[in-house]
Amino acid sequence: MDALARHVLLELNECNRERLSDSAFLRKNLLAAARAAGATIVSDTFHVFPPYDGVSGVVIVLESHLSIHTWPEHGYAAVDIFTCGTTVQPQKAVDLLVRELEPRDHSIVDMKRGIINPVAAHEGK
Amino acid sequence: MDALARHVLLELNECNRERLSDSAFLRKNLLAAARAAGATIVSDTFHVFPPYDGVSGVVIVLESHLSIHTWPEHGYAAVDIFTCGTTVQPQKAVDLLVRELEPRDHSIVDMKRGIINPVAAHEGK
């Protein structure tokens, strides 16, 4: 099965709670995670939401995007690493974020997106 | 199982190819999809990438985000609708995007994100 993209969904449980409401910290580390994975950064946007200062942030990369949403009140963060091409290594982004957010446990779902019919793709259909 | 968020992954195959490289069209419709679902728009960012004018776009909403990545050369688009709370209806966003992008077929994966331990959550752990 040939796929156009890879989508890593990362669940981070029981993190360092202070870090989950620190937008500057999260921005710095999601950008660092993109670079660590070998992605090329295009733009980013981060926002803080009351009442618990949860943060939503997205980094658009040439190879698609990375996103984070945090729930400081639950110690939880959801990260998505959506990439195309063969050069990006999502695991490097995962490693950096796990190190920096200090979850007690984490889990990964690694999905293929855009599974195409190779014959149709070849014929440009 | 209690979950903090819902994540709908939408695969759109054999779409109207012209629309997949039309950044203004995609932005208009991803914003419309967010509104149709009942989400509150915070910001958005869209970019076009050579050589096939594939588009990457993200709409940050109060309830998390919607994203789209398109491969016009394959007629394929990947959409993610990541939402928290009980008021957003992702299916309404799906319906709008399926109508506007005219895929020959599409599929949905509907996931829970942030499945928390209700006891730990209650105790604020």
Image (spheres, coloured by chain):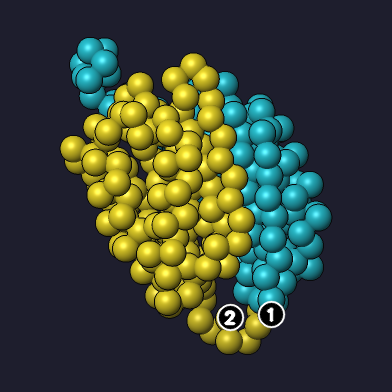
Chain colours: A cyan, B yellow
SS assignment at label 2: helix
Work out which residue is located at the far bottom of the displayed protein and give it: B122
Disc on res. B31: none
Residue A124 placement, left or right of A71: left
The residue at which mark 1 appears reads as: A51
Residue B77 placement, left or right of A63: left
Where B42 falls versus B45 (above or below)?
below
SS assignment at label 1: loop
Q: Please name the amino acid that badge 2 sits on.
A: Ala
Res. B108 in view: yes
Q: Residues within 10 Å of mark 2 (few under 14, many from 20)?
A: few
Give the residue at x 41% y 50%.
B29
Residue A27 placement, left or right of A92: right
Q: Chain of mark 1?
A: A
Of residues B19 and A1, which is closer to you in this image? B19
Q: Quadrant of residue A21?
A: bottom right
Res. A3 in view: no
Q: Chain of mark 2?
A: B
Q: Quadrant of residue B96?
A: bottom left
Where A10 falls versus B121 (above or below)?
above
Give the residue at x 64% y 43%.
A59
Residue B72 percent across, percent down from the top left = 37, 26
Of tags 2 and 1, the one toward the viewer is: 1
Q: Please name the amino acid that badge 1 sits on.
A: Pro
The residue at which mark 2 appears reads as: B120
